[in-house]
Image: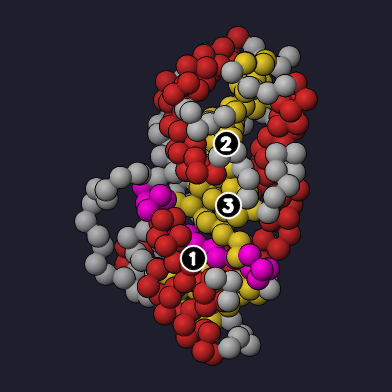
Amino acid sequence: MRTTRSPFAHAGHERLITFCEEALPGLPDAQVLAFYDRGFHIFTIAQADDEERAALERAFRQLVNEHVRFDGLLRGFGTGELIRTFVVTEDAAVQCGHVFEEEFLIGVTRDLDAADAMDEQVSRLVTRIRKEVYLQADQLPGGRHGPRDRPGIATQVLRTTAGEGADPALIADLESCLGSLACVDDLHYVAVYRDWRFLCAADVLDSPALAPWFGGAAGGEGARKMYQDFAARLRSDMPELAYALRQLSEAPLRRLVLDVVSGALYVYPLPGTRGFVAGLTVFQPEVFAAENRLREGLHRIGELLGTG
């Protein structure tokens, strides 16, 4: 691996560079690391020729811009700033981790079997830099991995919502499927869209345990409207994100995670449907568990929609 510094690197970045150089041999699934400070490229660690490295750096700068744009959209959710953007295409995976202020660390792998490991490794490195360089708290990007460290929450209020004009039999099946996925312990909201239209959703936003997030004047109903409005934007946001990453990958997007201070939003495009499955948690420690629960239901949702 070779470290390439930009003209914007200064003495204050040297410790960050050292941390990343020390970490990369222990991060076999992260094939590239790059750092950006206030929009400027600072350094890249990669085994690549100059042309390939320059192309990657342009893609990473665009990803930082997308991260900042999504951050502005998500602030209205009341769950804090965006700390981690994780994108998987059909041939690459990339994480943009927010380190401090306007500083971002980006990790990449082209081995999709290693995508989750790379993502976790970069999150750990972001946390190390935050704690040891900037003396900041661990924001727990990616959530807590491993067994749940608290008992499950027994009381939950499940609600399902259907779009207009859909086949009643399909909606009934989707309501059953999504209702089995929504859970007050982790996955708090899940919705399905086809042809960019809302089909069905299930959520536990009215549960007592979620009152600190949804017990205000707007309540769960206001949150549902906000999430549907955000999903409607994805018709333009997803192509824009794919275009921003074109110098890294021109393959279709298959997964997007927008990890905020308190929870995360997940988007899984459904091939052949012009649609997607969206999920949400507001429990930061359960970001990992909530996504796993969502992924367990994707095959069944695909069967119901005829995508396999």
- Of the 4 image quadrants, the one containing the C terminus is bottom right
Label 3: few (<14), some or many (≥20) within 10 Å? Answer: many
Residue in the picture at 59% in, 48% down: 88
Q: Which residue is mark 1?
A: 298
Mark closer to the chain start, 1 or 2: 2
- Residue 116: horizontal and vertical position, in percent? 47, 43
- Residue 92: horizontal and vertical position, in percent? 61, 42
Mark closer to the chain start, 3 or 1: 3
Q: Which residue is mark 3?
A: 256
Q: Residue 175: tell me if it is visible.
A: yes
Amino acid on which the number 2 mark rests in the picture: Thr
Most foreground residue, 9 or 95? 95
Count of labels shown?
Answer: 3
Residue in the picture at 44% in, 66% down: 297
Q: Which residue is mark 2?
A: 109
Amino acid on which the number 1 mark rests in the picture: Leu
- Residue 33: horizontal and vertical position, in percent? 58, 27
143 in relation to 297, above or below: above
Q: Residue 71: tell me if it is visible.
A: no
Amino acid on which the number 3 mark rests in the picture: Leu
Label 1: few (<14), some or many (≥20) within 10 Å? Answer: some
- Whether tag 2 and tag 3 are in contact, CB under 8 A, the answer is no
Mark closer to the chain start, 2 or 3: 2
Q: CA distance from mark 2 to mark 3?
A: 15 Å
Range of magenta residues: 271-289
